[in-house]
Amino acid sequence: MAAAPDATPDVPEDDEVTSNTQHLAEQLELRMRELGLNKSSIARNGGPSRSVLQRLGGEGYWIPSVENQEKLDLVLQWEPGSTATVLNGGYPTPRETRKPVATRLSTDFDNLNRHIEERLKQLRLNKTKLANMGGPSRNTLATLGSRGYTPTRETFERLDSFLQWEPGSALAALRGGTPTPIGMVPEDLAGFMRAPAAGAMERLNSAVRRLDRMEAQVAETVKDMHRALDQCRAAITVIMDELEDADASDWPASKSAHAGARAAATPGVKPSPNRPRKVGNNPYSSPSHN
C-alpha cells in the first residue's frame, strides 16, 4: 500500500496557508523548548521525520498530511486536533492544562511588559525610539494587556526582531517564560547600533519572503489560467468536430445549398455546373412557364 503523502493535493488560493505553516513552526519550537525536545528526538519518538519538520514554515504551499498532524499531537502532548487548529490560525491545547494556549496567555502580560522594559534599558532604547525604527507603535505597547485587546502575530515578530530576541521569545514571555536574547548585551556604542540595523534587516527579509510567496502564488495562478485555456481549446475543438460531422451527414443537399449561397453572395461568379437542372417531368423542379 502506498504511503500517505506529506502534502494535500489542493493548492491554496492565497498565502494564508503558508502563513499558518509558519505559525505551526513557531508553536513547534515553543513546545520543544517546554518539553526539552528537538526535531531528531521527535522523529525518534514516533513523530514526523526530520525532513517533514524541516519543511514547516518554508517557502511554497505545503501543509503536513493528516497522519503527520496526528503524530505531532501525540509527540508534543497536545490534545487531538491541535495541529489542525494551529494550521487554521489558532493555538494548540496542551494535555496538561486542557486549555488553549491563547486562553492561558491572558494573565501573563505583566511578565511580557516587564521583559520589554528590561530589554529596552539594556539596549538604551525607549518605546518612542523602538517605534521610530520599525518596532511596535507606542499605542500598541500601551495596550498590551488591556481588556479586549489581543496582540497580533506581527506584534510578536516585531518585538523579537527589534529587541534582538530569538524568534518566539515574545510569545514565550507572554506565556510566563523568559525571552532568549540574541548574543550578549553590547558594551560599546557601536554594539548598540546593531539593534535598529538588525531589526530593519529582519523587516526587509520578511518583506522579501512575502514577495517570494506572492511570486509563487502568481506563478501558480498563471499555470491555472493556462490549464483553463487548454481545456477551453479542447472543448471548442470537440464542438467544431461535432458540427462538421452534422454538416457532412446532410450532404449533398447541404453542399448544393451552401455552394449556391456562396455563388449568389459573390458578384460576378456563375453558379456551379453541378447545380441541379430543371427538368419538365421532375416533380421537384419549378413549373415551366410558356
Image (spheres, helix red, strand yellow):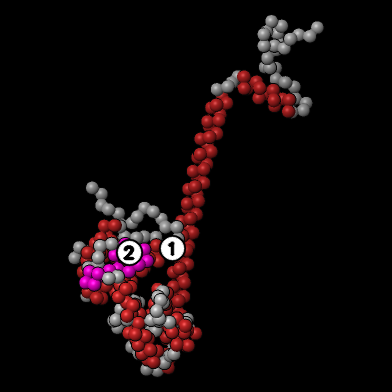
Residue 16 visible in the snapshot: yes
* Callout 2 crowding tier (Cα within 10 Å): few <14, some 14–19, many ≥20: some
Whether pointer 2 and pointer 1 mark residues with C-beta atoms closer than 8 Å, the reply is: no
In this view, the residue in front, 104 or 178, is 104
Q: Amino acid at mark 1?
A: Asp
* Callout 1 crowding tier (Cα within 10 Å): few <14, some 14–19, many ≥20: some
Pinpoint residue 43: horizontal percent, then vertical percent: 22, 65
The quadrant holding residue 145 is bottom left
Question: What is the count of numbered marks?
Answer: 2
The quadrant holding residue 169 is bottom left
Residue displayed at 67% across by 8% down: 283
Which label number is shown at residue 206? none
In this view, the residue in front, 51 or 10, is 10
SS category of the residue bearing label 1: loop
Pinpoint residue 154: horizontal percent, then vertical percent: 42, 74
Residue displayed at 41% across by 77% down: 149
Spatial separation of the CA atoms under disc 2 and disc 1: 17 Å
Is 25 positioned to the left or the right of 277 in the image? left
SS category of the residue bearing label 2: helix
Which label number is shown at residue 85? 2
Check if residue 85 falls in the magenta segment: yes
Viewport quadrant of the C terminus: top right
Check if residue 166 falls in the magenta segment: no
Q: Amino acid at mark 2?
A: Thr
Q: Is residue 188 above or below residue 37?
A: below
Residue 48 visible in the snapshot: no
Name the residue carrying label 1: 15
Residue displayed at 71% across by 6% down: 280
Q: Magenta stretch?
A: 82-98
Is 29 positioned to the left or the right of 226 in the image? left
The quadrant holding residue 63 is bottom left
